[in-house]
Image (cartoon, rainbow, N blue to C red):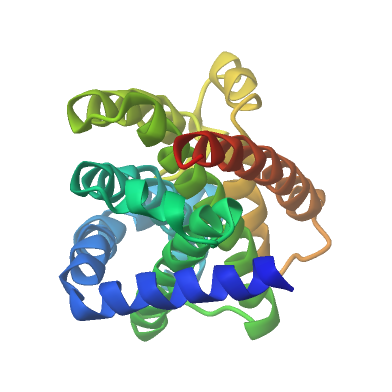
Amino acid sequence: MKLVRDTWLIFQRQTLLLVRQPVWLIVGVFQPVMYLLLFAPLLKPALAPLGADTDAEMYRIFIPGLLVLLAIFGGLFQGFGLIAELRAGIIERSRVTPVSRFALLLGRSLRDVVSLLVQAVIITVLALLLGLRVQLGHLLLAYLLLALIALMTATVSYGVALVVKSEDALAPLMNTVAQPVLLLSGILLPLAFAPSWLQRVADWNPFSWAVDGARALFAGDIGDPSVWQGLTIIGVITVLAVIWAARAFARSVR
């Protein structure tokens, strides 16, 4: 199938570029590691009312939120690289190639998903060394949720980058979106601590559902409704985001 072949070719090229400059992988994982090492130890007393009276329980609450944070921010700022390619004429030269326009987007986005999952594995391994306990099957399902989030945010970032075509416009726009998403998703602290009105507002944030689902998986409660609710909501939004970004990409390289 041409789309699959073209996507694989673009994915290989983008991955090779990432491997040649692994500093971006290191930079991407640095901040979450700092949160893990310097912020997580402060949470045990704060999370005690939720039953997190051991290191394992504390990390089961904190690590899923941290990984969702990594997926959101790791994807939202991928558009900067695309703007650089626009300025260098790389996207312009793509017009004369027979490669599928959708593959140009999907190959890049899948590279971002793989990069995110590598970083997530690093964070998880460090957390396991610090006391986290989680079942492998539940962890893999949580990684699927993270992959969907990374695919969604990366494609949205690429689509917006093609519209604004400027780092000066993209940076404040992404920060404006990311800030309320962070505060209304219970990433660092569960929203159980929040007043009821804030919890109601957070119900409209799809990433809040994703965090709840990821925490249920880390806690070993795969039957919790938040798991399938989070996967369904994020899955639907991801499909819509990919379709929108693909159309923006097709118009830009037509």
Q: Is residue 105 visible?
A: yes
Q: Residue 247's spot in the image, x, y percent? A: 60, 36
Q: Residue at x 34, y 31 (%)?
A: 174
Q: Residue 55's spot in the image, x, y percent? A: 41, 71
Q: Is residue 78 visible?
A: no
Spot the residue most to the front.
Answer: 96
Which one is in front, 230 or 36?
230
Number of numbered discs: 0
Q: Left or right of 207: which side holds 44? A: left
- Vertical order, 2 against 52 (above or below): below
Q: Left or right of 4: which side holds 29? A: left
- Vertical order, 134 against 75 (above or below): below
Q: Left or right of 132: which side holds 224? A: right
Can you tell which quarter of the image residue 176 is in? top left
Which one is in front, 22 or 108?
108
Which quadrant holds the N terminus? bottom right
Which one is in front, 24 or 9?
9
Q: Left or right of 69: which side holds 240? A: right
Q: Residue at x 21, y 65 (%)?
A: 24
Q: Residue at x 27, y 54 (%)?
A: 42
Q: Residue 50's spot in the image, x, y percent? A: 55, 49
Spot the residue most to the top.
Answer: 197
Can you tell which quarter of the image residue 206 is in? top right
Q: Residue at x 45, y 60 (%)?
A: 108
